[in-house]
Amino acid sequence: MGEEARSPEDLRSMTRQCELAVARLKDSGAQALSFLKLLDEVEALMGRLERRGVDLRSEKTRMKTVEGLLRSKATILLKEMRAVGGLAQARQEVSPDESRWWWYLDRAVAEQRCRTMRRRLIIGAVVVALLVAVRVAFFAFLAPSPGERERYEHLTRAVQLREDGDLTGALVEYEAARALAPDEPEIHLWLWVLHEEEGRENEAAAAFATAKELLENEVKFLVQRGTIYGQMDNVEATLADANAARALDPESAWAHFVLGGVYEAQSKIPEAVEEFERAAELANQAGDSALFVQDRMRAAMLLQRAPVLPQPTEEGGG
């Protein structure tokens, strides 16, 4: 049968094949390539049938569902395409235009990973910078005891395991750190988050209650929890906690600092600069020189990226 002679019944059959293929994408191996080529055929046939005046509303709705499922399974597709040399190689052989987006899902996945990593780096910089400063001061000037050193080592390993995606391993390290420092609220907050991720609701509730009790100041609780949300790439939750903390205490330098980090992650550069400058002003007033320096550095870096913004004024300048 020629391509032009294909009927709406053929399209419905091909649509059904697409539905089955996307549902069975995992472990499909080389069949994933056949699926992508079938999508090409479906798109071409739809165009021809539409030009003949055929009503394709039902088929289009079904294919939208298929496309949505394929987007959500993009990483699975990339894995299966390795059986035929990878999506990039197949794309080179097919030479599709960019409207056939399924041939470019590797690029979409890479871009999403870059955005995710950027958000983690930006928001996580709050805690990373603080931990580095505290660690240097701790070991250089305070002569920590063996137990304190051991606690820091557990926390360092926990951070690395989290970054590697090993939440179970990180949980073990935080449990070990809690045994050495049962009154450290941040440890309990991380236990709460990780227990929730592991589906341990009772343990999560207990850790949350303990953290809440140890952090009697609601603003400090919101700032610390929001920062942890940020490290878990939950930008929306970080924004909610930062805004709540700022509403409770507009003079909280840390609330403005975390909020600035969220705006930076969202590429809202003017808003981020404004928050970092406000945080610097408040940190300076409170005598928090470490936070003041971080705020000014973050604002300066953003202004370099957006030189059209007004430059910050010097503290106490005339």
Image (cartoon, grey):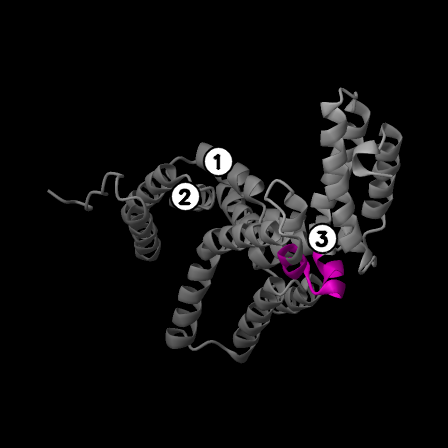
Task: Single out the mark in the foreground, 2 or 1.
Answer: 2
The N terminus, quarter of image: top right
Q: Mark 3 points at which residue?
A: 197
Disc 3 secondary structure class:
helix
Rounded to the nearest whole Å, what is the CA distance between mark 2 and mark 1?
11 Å
Rounded to the nearest whole Å, what is the CA distance between mark 3 and mark 2?
27 Å
Residue at 51% x, 35% y is 244
> For this rendering, which residue is in front, 76 or 284?
76
Q: From what the image shows, is residue 78 above or below residue 143?
A: above
**Residue 258, percent from left and from top:** 45, 46
Rounded to the nearest whole Å, what is the CA distance between mark 1 and mark 3?
25 Å
> For this rendering, which residue is in front, 119 or 75?
75
Q: Name the residue under label 1.
A: 243
Q: From what the image shows, is residue 58 above or below residue 279?
A: above
The part of the chain drawn in magenta is 78-92
Q: Is residue 208 left or right of residue 229?
A: right
Q: In this view, does 264 lie to the left or right of 1?
A: left
Quick check: can you spot residue 191? Answer: no
Label disc, if present, on residue 260 of the rendered structure: 2
Disc 1 secondary structure class:
helix
- Magenta-colored segment: predominant secondary structure: helix
Sequence-first disc among 3 and 2: 3
Residue at 78% x, 54% y is 32
Disc 2 secondary structure class:
helix
> For this rendering, which residue is in front, 179 or 308?
308
Q: Which amino acid does label 1 sit on?
A: Asn
**Residue 17, percent from left and from top:** 86, 42
| Magenta highlight on residue 80 | yes
